[in-house]
Image: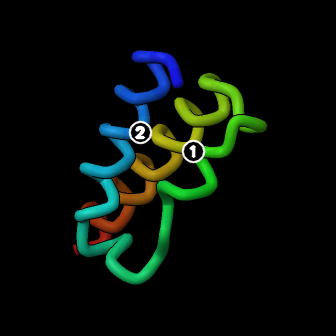
Amino acid sequence: MSKTRLDLLGALWQIQTHPAFRTVDIVTSAASPKVSDDQVRNHIEGCLRFIARKAEAI
C-alpha cells in the first residue's frame, strides 16, 4: 500500500471518529485495492461536506 493511500486512510480514520459516522464504517471500503486514490479523496470530500451540512443545520 502506498504512502499516499495510507495518508488518505488516516484522514478517513480521523473522520470516522466524528459523531456523524459513529455507526457507519467509512474506512473499510476505501482500503480495497480496487478503489483508486482519487475515489478515496472524493469519499473524504463527501464526508466532510456531510459534516459541514450537519453543522449548518444546528
Which residue shows up at 43% across the image and 48% down it? 49
Which disc is residue 9 wearing? Answer: 2
- Rendered location of residue 32, percent (x, y): 66, 44
Disc 1 marks a residue whose amino acid type is: Ala
Disc 1 + disc 2, Cβ < 8 Å: yes
Q: Amino acid type of disc 2?
A: Leu
- Quadrant of the drawing holding the C terminus: bottom left
State the count of labels: 2
**Relative horizontal placement of residue 36, taking residue 46 as reference (left or right):** right
Q: Is residue 14 above or below residue 57?
A: above
Labelled disc at residue 31 = 1
Query: Which colour assignment does the render follow?
Result: rainbow
Q: Could you classify mark 1 by the number of other residues whose Cα lies within 10 Å: few (under 14), some (14-19), or many (20 or more)? A: some
Residue at (66% x, 33% y) in the render? 39
Horizontal arrangement in the rendering, residue 12 relative to residue 30 (left or right): left
Q: Which mark is residue 12?
A: none
- Dividing the picture into quarters, in which one does residue 17 lie? bottom left
| Residue 46 locus on image (x, y percent) | 52, 47
